Image (cartoon, rainbow, N blue to C red):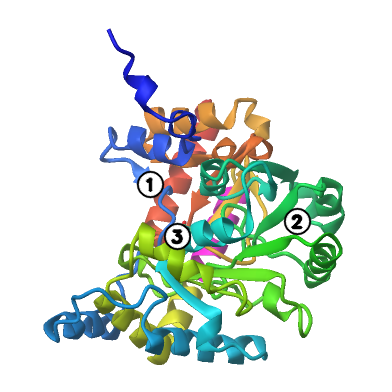
Amino acid sequence: MTDPYRRISPMAQTYPASDIRKMFNIALNYPEAVKLTVGEPDFPTPEHIKQAGIRAIENDETKYVANAGLPDLRAAIAGKYSVRWDREVTADNVMITFGAMEALTLSLDTTVSPGQEVIIADPSFPNYLGQIHRLGAIAVPVPVTEESGFKVHADDVRAAVTKKTAAIIINSPSNPLGSIIDREDLGQIADLADEFGFTIISDEVYDEIVFDDATFTSIAEVRPGFDRFLVVGSFSKTYAMTGWRCGFVIGPAAFIPPMPLLQEGLTSSLPAFVQEAAIAAVTGPQSVVAEMVSSYAQRRDLIVDRVNAIDGISVLRPEATFYAFANVKDWGMTSWEVATALLERHGLATIPGSAFGPAGEGYLRLTFAVSPETIEEACRRLEAFAATR
Ligand SMILES: Cc1ncc(COP(=O)(O)O)c(C=O)c1O
């Protein structure tokens, strides 16, 4: 008998499986469960964006287009971020990608070689691990604690830097932590990048889902002329466009030219009609974003207040995103055990904190991009669990 695995590369055999996906698959067996699992807006894509996509299909914009993306979309994104960051961004600084996911792939491919190290926060978005693994690079975690407000601190980053550090992935605002890295720490991380010559890949897909009581700073804003960064952005969360798969990288002009070449062999180009919809998103009314963010803010307050009234579970008030990272250590079980028991006994699906790294043990990620009624029902189920455990 031949061993089928002999044909599968070691990289593929050892690709780190995401526990988010594992929990999601288990939850499929509980169709009636209340779900606080999925990290996407519950709003439909705004009408004017959908219409732009439909018009583009009707106009036969259904052919291959430039690897780097439609010039008009690159220019529109450049225009938006020049204003947001108060620094010059041109179309040459922008690469259009299949979601932030491919933006991360291209950013890592462009800056990291096999055997080099990439610093990431622990807990963090699990796909970073797989992407670093694919490259044959090594992920170096920096633990982030509740005691420090779930924020990455520059001192901890400094302690993780070695001669092999090629990049750091920062994610502010953070999935799953809902926190924002302080401007001072961001500046110090930029100084470290200059001192040691590594690149900052800054995953800023939640840059607009920030609540009134918080201020978000992009790595591009830390100081004029700083250019060791690649900002990863996306239409998925801001404009409720997860399924359209439109993301981008913004970086110094020297970093961008390899990306269209890599794109050619990966996906060639993002569909033109998707890019037309994205142009409508950037150039159309931004009130649609403000309305969604204000709704997330209300739901954040609801979930935080309700959860903090339950015995044995507590949660910091997230400054941004639509995730709350709740501490369940007092329940004396692993986060996987808590998540499984909640699902099996009370029909409530959550994501165990350990899915985001070892430092996530003892926490549950609760998504509040769901209706207030769903949040209320989920909290009743958490109460029932707390009472009967
Ligand atoms: C931190 C973070 N980065 C990247 C992504 C991927 O986003 P996209 O849909 O643009 O690929 C997500 C999606 O959940 C995310 O939470």
**Contact flag, marks 2 and 3 (Cβ < 8 Å):** no
Which disc number belongs to residue 261?
A: none
In this view, the residue in front, 306 or 333, is 333
In this view, the residue in front, 62 or 372, is 62
The residue tagged 1 is: 35
User: How many residues crowd around disc 2 within 10 Å: few (fewer than 14), some, or many (20 or more)?
Assistant: many
Q: Residue drawn at (20%, 75%), measured in percent from left and top?
A: 63
Please, what secondary structure does the residue beneath circle 1 have?
strand
The residue tagged 2 is: 152
Magenta stretch: dominant secondary structure:
helix
Please, what secondary structure does the residue beneath circle 3 have?
helix
Residue 153, percent from left and from top: 81, 57
Q: Is residue 23 left or right of residue 45?
A: right
In this view, the residue in front, 27 or 33, is 27
Please, what secondary structure does the residue beneath circle 2 have?
loop
- Asked where in the image residue 136 lies, by quadrant, the reply is top right
Cα distance, mark 2 to mark 3? Answer: 24 Å
The residue tagged 3 is: 102
Q: Amino acid at mark 2?
A: Val
Q: Residue drawn at (76%, 83%), measured in percent from left and top?
A: 225
Q: Which residues are magenta?
A: 296-308
Residue 183, percent from left and from top: 78, 72
User: How many residues crowd around disc 3 within 10 Å: few (fewer than 14), some, or many (20 or more)?
Assistant: many
Q: Amino acid at mark 1?
A: Lys
Q: Amino acid at mark 3?
A: Glu
